[in-house]
Amino acid sequence: MREMNKLDPLRPTSIDEDFALWSAEQAALIRAGKFDRVDLENVAEEIESLGRSDRHQIANRLVVLLQHLLNYQFQPENRTNSWRASILGQREAINALIEDSPSLAPHPAKVLARSYRVGRLEASGETKLPLATFPETCPYTIAQILDTEFLPREL
């Protein structure tokens, strides 16, 4: 077994063999300026995947956020601090991702319809309320959804 701090210049690690070791080796090669030995195609693919990962994380967090906003609005008698904490936590996480990568600012609006469909289904499943209880289209604006002060009113 090879260790991460021991680079073998004669036998580079394959990305499929040991991702963590491959990553460490690629970083060391780049830092050492040995660009001719860098696995450029896979490094480029991994860099691209980082952006995809952040976009997926925003969409997934938006689903949870919308689910709990719906729960909060349509089951006022069951409001809990955990719903409020989840709402705030998801907002903070989405806002942090956008703060770190401002180019992702339009992404929540782009995935809102799809995220709402899933969040609506999950809200119905969790609350045991019929799906028809919840509006077919998102009743909140993206500004409201991401606003740390906004909580929906009872209907």
Image: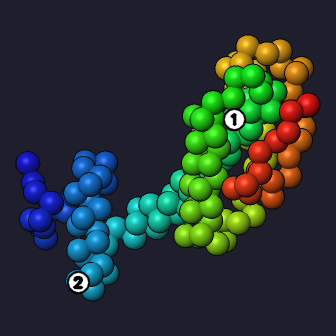
Q: Is residue 19 left or right of residue 133?
A: left
- Residue 149 sits in which quadrant? bottom right
Residue type, label 1: His
Q: Is residue 139 left or right of residue 14?
A: right
Q: Is residue 110 something that shows in the picture?
A: no
With respect to residue 129, does 12 lie above or below?
below
- Residue 146 sits in which quadrant? bottom right
Residue, x 82% and y 41% (percent of image)? 152
Tag shown at residue 82: none
Q: Is residue 87 something that shows in the picture?
A: yes
Q: How is the image coloured?
A: rainbow
Residue, x 67% and y 20% (percent of image)? 126
Pointer 2 residue:
32
Nearest the viewer among 53 and 83 is: 83
- Give me the C-alpha separation between circle 1 and circle 2: 48 Å
Residue type, label 2: Ala
Residue, x 9% and y 54% (percent of image)? 2
The kind of secondary structure element at disc 1 is helix
